[in-house]
Image (spheres, helix red, strand yellow):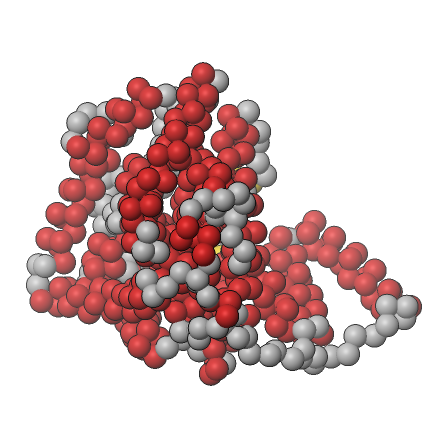
Amino acid sequence: MASRPMLPLRLVNLPSVSNWPLLCVGGVAVAMGGYAVAESSMIAIAAAAAVFAVGAASLNLITAERAVTLVLLYGVMLLGKGWANLGIPGAIPIPATEILFVPLAAVALFDRPTRLDARILVPLCLFACLVGTRLLFDYPVWRIFAIRDTTPALEAFILLIGHRAVMRDGVQAWIRRMRHLTVIVLIYGTVYPFVSNAGVTSPSVGLQRDAPLFDPTGVKFSVIAMSLYFWIFGKGWVRYLSLGLAMGLLAQYQARSLYLMLPIAVLVAGWATRSSLRTLARIIPAVVIAGLIVLWASAMAIEGTEGPVSTDFLSSHLNTLTGADGPNAKTIDARQDFFAKTVSEVAQNPGTLIVGLGLGPDLTFGQWIGKEGQLVRNPHNSYLETFARTGLLGFGLWMSVLLGCLIPIARRARSGFGPTERFCGWILAAAVVYLGVAAVQPIMAFPYGSVPTFFLLGMGVAASKSPRNDQDAPDASFASGPTMGYSPA
């Protein structure tokens, strides 16, 4: 799509670097920063934020906005749970995600030319108002737990950031940026299991309790979702290698939700790009590559997240999906129990059925305790949690937001074979991974799930509205068969 020209905006003229007073001020700032780090991490973070704000005001604000957006994306996709524990600690901790995305969302909300469509923005704002109203009543009772449960509603506004990014820079620019991000995420997702097996320690961070900065929890979801980029935009060995690598890594990640969602997402990608039959044929080389990876990992005695990487373990782990006994089979029974009890609690009277149980209540009923002794209050089902906490009213608004994004993305994806259509096809398939996992994992309560999901959906909505031009002409090689390399964006 043709990008709207953005002129550099300068609020303050920077003095020449050769000006000696500037060097003196810089030296003092460095010294004060070192002292702040030594005395208080909170002071250091606040000082860094202030310096960044001054620098952004002095330079091109569009460039600064774009840079912060990329920092947010790279942070959540590469650091996973470690990123979720970055921020300003305290009685009411402020996560780094909120520090970065709230200003970005505010700019996207108040800039009319790049604002999200009203058919999505209105139910999103109504849902946020409902959650905010619930917070006023629930905070006196549940305190910090009530605040934590506002996270999914707040971070859903990342939709605005993804939408503005494409409206501002154009589809082609973000196709390129997503390619770079995909390469880095795939490399990191391949390397970190070996680093973990080698026993390499990570520095600790934490908002309320210490956690490793390089905690891979949550990274695996982005690895699988991003691998579909080259399944759609790649050609020949690049396409087969990306999907084969993702399938092989499942043997190390050992997440039952991804066992299901990866093949479903591949089928969705085939449907969205109108190449279902070719997709089925192209899966075979990828399966062969995945098999070789699993055999090699088994021979090297590599440990996965739940057990050894071996065909025997994978078979027993997969069988638990059919009700058989096996590794962590009890968690499936627990989820079914939570579902039945939660629905029963919500349906106990018309009031809770309409507006929910509220923010803060334990939806696992005290049955789950985390590895660090913390109470696990999330039933590991984002849709069930939304329904339980906000009732039919909130759940209806939430689903209208999601469907309002997915439907136009799917329509544009199936409307042709150009780069924009394929971009929408990839976004649809990647979103299916995150949204499908959200039915059995609490990823929407953490930035490693909410940020990529809503950013992708926002980009897809903007791309679905982009006008057709010469760059969107069908790529003959995409429909004709495999070649070497990847197709140009």
Q: Is residue 167 visible?
A: yes
Q: Is residue 85 visible?
A: no
- In percent of the image, x 60 and y 79: which residue is there? 5
- Left or right of 107: which side holds 358? left
Q: Position of residue 194 (x, y in %)?
A: 52, 28
Residue 372 versus residue 365 in the image, above or below: above
Q: Position of residue 298 (x, y in %)?
A: 42, 19
Residue 145 versus residue 166 in the image, above or below: above
Residue 270 versus residue 54 in the image, above or below: above
Q: Position of residue 311 (x, y in %)?
A: 33, 21
Residue closer to the observer: 455 or 232: 232
- Left or right of 295: which side holds 393? left
Q: Quadrant of residue 293?
A: top left
Q: Position of residue 445 (x, y in %)?
A: 36, 53
Furthest toward the bottom, the residue is 112
- In percent of the image, x 48 and y 73: which residue is there? 469
Residue closer to the observer: 329 or 263: 263
Q: Quadrant of residue 366?
A: top left
Q: Quadrant of residue 24?
A: bottom right
- Left or right of 248: which side holds 66? right
Residue closer to the observer: 146 or 435: 435
- In percent of the image, x 54 and y 45: which residue is there? 485
Residue closer to the observer: 192 or 187: 187
How many callouts does the rendering have?
A: 0
- In percent of the image, x 83 and y 74: which residue is there? 15
